[in-house]
Image (spheres, rainbow, N blue to C red):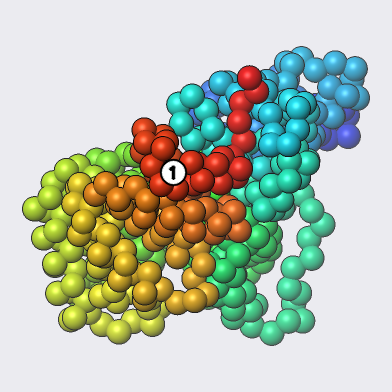
Amino acid sequence: MAQKPRELTPWASPLDNWGYELRELRTLRGLSLRALAKQAVLDHAHLGRFERAERMATRDQAAQLDIVLGANGMLLRLWERIGSEHGHVANPPAHVANALHKLAFPGQQQAVSPGDDTDTVVVPCRTPEGIRFVPVPRRAVLASGLVGLAAASFPAPAFAAPYSPVGSSTPAPVEHFAQVRRVLIQTDNLMGPRTVLPAITQKLGELTVLRRKARGKDADRLLKLETRFEELAGWLAQDIGDGRAAYAHTARALDDSHIAGDTDLTAYILGRKAQLAADLGHRSDALGLATAARRTAPAGSRLEVIAVMHQAHGHSLLGEELEALGSYDEALLLLERADQDGVWGSWLDSAYIHTARARSLADLGHHEQAVAGFRDALEAVPAGYRRDRGVYLARAACSHAGVGDIERAAAVGLEAVQIATETGSARIIDQLGLLDVTLAATPSAGGAREFRSAFDRILYHPAQ
């Protein structure tokens, strides 16, 4: 028989309150101490002591638990109160990102320490190692004038906020949340992830509460919808440059898909994990996850086509040209015969596959062919898909630079910088970072200086 957890006393002290909230969030997420320890890369025995107020976490540990549990900064704020109310902090605040002890902002002379505030946002920063995404205080981002980057905090449901979801008097809550998700997806492409992420994570909190209260088929439907929200939160977290949060959301989505027993959902999320692994630079993992997605997807479905596309991209990252291009050809053939499922891959068409192929051609060094592919993609992208247009522009700019057309690369890159400024998309900024490195080698080339100056204005810089 499992041992009954010790009753906690949150009223006893700020440290006890912190431990109580930690256990509440862990329980709400359905995680054991060992499961949470694995996700947060901490000792599970330490976690138990944290919950029982027998040991105080360091600030870095509190921050990591806040991210993994989706506490929206609540655990960090409660951790700070332990020190302020007791007159000391057992572990002094550590600066975020070890190489970035101080950040200087455009138009300001003073440096700001990330330890000065617990309400943080992830922003792109120029470092000696290249462009990195790091958490810094929201107030500092606002003060710098980069307002567009201050819209979203760490991706996490606001569980600590007073709960006011759609009530029982609202008919068909599943349909309501499904409609909300569709609207937010459209808004994301137009305005960027930082605008949408807070709403998505708030709805995740509401869905979790509703699903835990529901029974039978209603609970099953809410779980599947919650899984789709988790996957979307992972996509948005990835697009603001927070890879750890993206991984945590996507991992939870995969777990929930298995609980729901929905193999279609599992196949789709395996594909998303393959995409995330590719963007994080885990090439072999990307191909392996894509292969698992294909094994799981029903034969003849659009999910199978999506999985084959992820396989193609994985092959290209590994330099396996024949396998990559052959997989794209296979995806096109499969698409012709695929069922017309309105749920999975309704956005998938031959133009989308050719655009993905252009990206892989660039990875393989065939920049001239990639330029043509991105040109077609830019002509076909709908007007409302602002973020996608920025991604295609940034990739096209890199391919123009790859064929030696520096002037065109700089001009296209400048257009992408404008969209990056509007949306804060890490997908765009990552590509522009590659272009920036290339143009730095030819600073006198036409437009290179102008592009690099414009790109610099949307980045933070370490203090000199």
Q: Up-down: is 39 above or below 264?
A: above
> Which residue shows up at 32% across the image and 39% down it?
282
Instruction: Give residue 86's quadrant in the image.
Output: top right
> Which residue shows up at 26% across the image and 46% down it?
404
Quick check: 247 left or right of 219? Answer: left
Residue 440: image x %, image y %?
A: 41, 34
> Which residue shows up at 34% across the image and 47% down it?
406
Residue 242: image x %, image y %?
A: 53, 43
Label 1: few (<14), some (14–19) or many (≥20) C-alpha neighbours in 10 Å: many
Q: Up-down: is 114 above or below 214?
A: above
Query: Mark 1 is on which residue type?
Result: Ala
> Which residue shows up at 45% across the image and 65% down it?
389
Placement of the C terminus among the 4 image quadrants: top right
Residue 336: image x %, image y %?
A: 19, 81
Which one is in front, 394 or 286? 394
Q: Is residue 180 visible?
A: yes
Instruction: Give residue 284's quadrant in the image.
Output: top left
Which one is in front, 231 or 392? 392
Q: Secondary structure at mark 1?
A: helix
**Residue labelled with disc 1:** 448
Which one is in front, 366 or 332? 366
Quick check: 380 left or right of 172? Answer: left
Residue 82: image x %, image y %?
A: 83, 25
